[in-house]
Amino acid sequence: QVQLMESGGGSVQTGESLRLSCAVSGATSRDYCMGWFRQAPGKKREGVAGIDSDGSAVYADSVKGRFTISQDNGKNLYLQMNSLKPDDTAMYYCAADLCPPTATQALAVYLSLGGAGMDWWGKGTLVTISS
C-alpha cells in the first residue's frame, strides 16, 4: 500500500514562491507515475504536473515555466512553484499510480482528467496566494 503525505503549503503573496513536498512510503516498485493536482473552491480538480519513473515531466499550460516537478532518489515528490498568482490558490494533492508502458502519454491523460484513475492519493496541502 503506497502512502503519500503532502507538506509545504502556506499563504504567500503574488510573485512569491513555495516548494511542496510529498513523502512516499510503502512503495515496492520503482515504476510509479506521480503527479500534482489541485482543486480550488467550487472548481473541479485539475492536473498541475506529472513525472514518470524515468524523470520525464509534463505540465499543465497554466503552470509551464513557473512550476517544476521533481523526485529524489527515495522517490519523494516535489513541486517548486515560482511567480505564484492568486489563481494558483487551491488544495494541492500528490497522487501515484503504476506507470504503463506509455508513461508520458498516460501522465498527459491523467493531468487532463484531473487525476481520475490514479490509485493513491495524499490528503492535500493548502496553498493560498494573496494579491
Image (cartoon, helix red, strand yellow):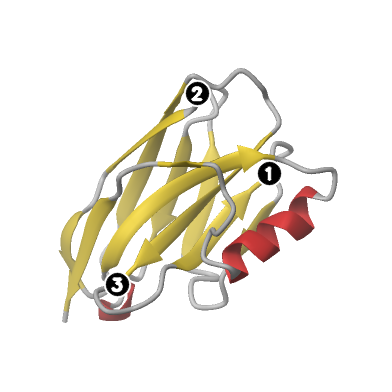
Please report the residue visible at 26 percent of the width from the left and 71 percent of the height from the top.
Answer: 89
Q: Which mark is residue 1?
A: 2
Label count reads 3
User: What is the x, y in percent for residue 38?
Assistant: 38, 63
Considering only order in the chain, which callout, 2 or 3, is on the residue closer to the N terminus? Answer: 2
Image quadrant where residue 27 sits: top right
Q: Which mark is residue 40?
A: 3
Considering only order in the chain, which callout, 2 or 1, is on the residue closer to the N terminus? Answer: 2
Assign a secondary structure to mark 3. Answer: loop
Residue marked by disc 1? 52
Vertically, is 36 above or below 32? below
Q: Disc 1 versus disc 2: distance between alpha carbons?
A: 19 Å
Badge 2 density bin: few <14, some 14–19, many ≥20, Cα 10 Å: few
Image quadrant containing the C terminus: bottom left
The amino acid at mark 1 is Asp
The amino acid at mark 3 is Ala
- Marks 3 and 2: which is nearer the front? 2
Q: Which mark is residue 9?
A: none
Assign a secondary structure to mark 2. Answer: loop
Horizontal side, residue 2 vs residue 19: left or right: right
Assign a secondary structure to mark 1. Answer: loop
User: What is the x, y in percent for residue 104?
Assistant: 76, 54
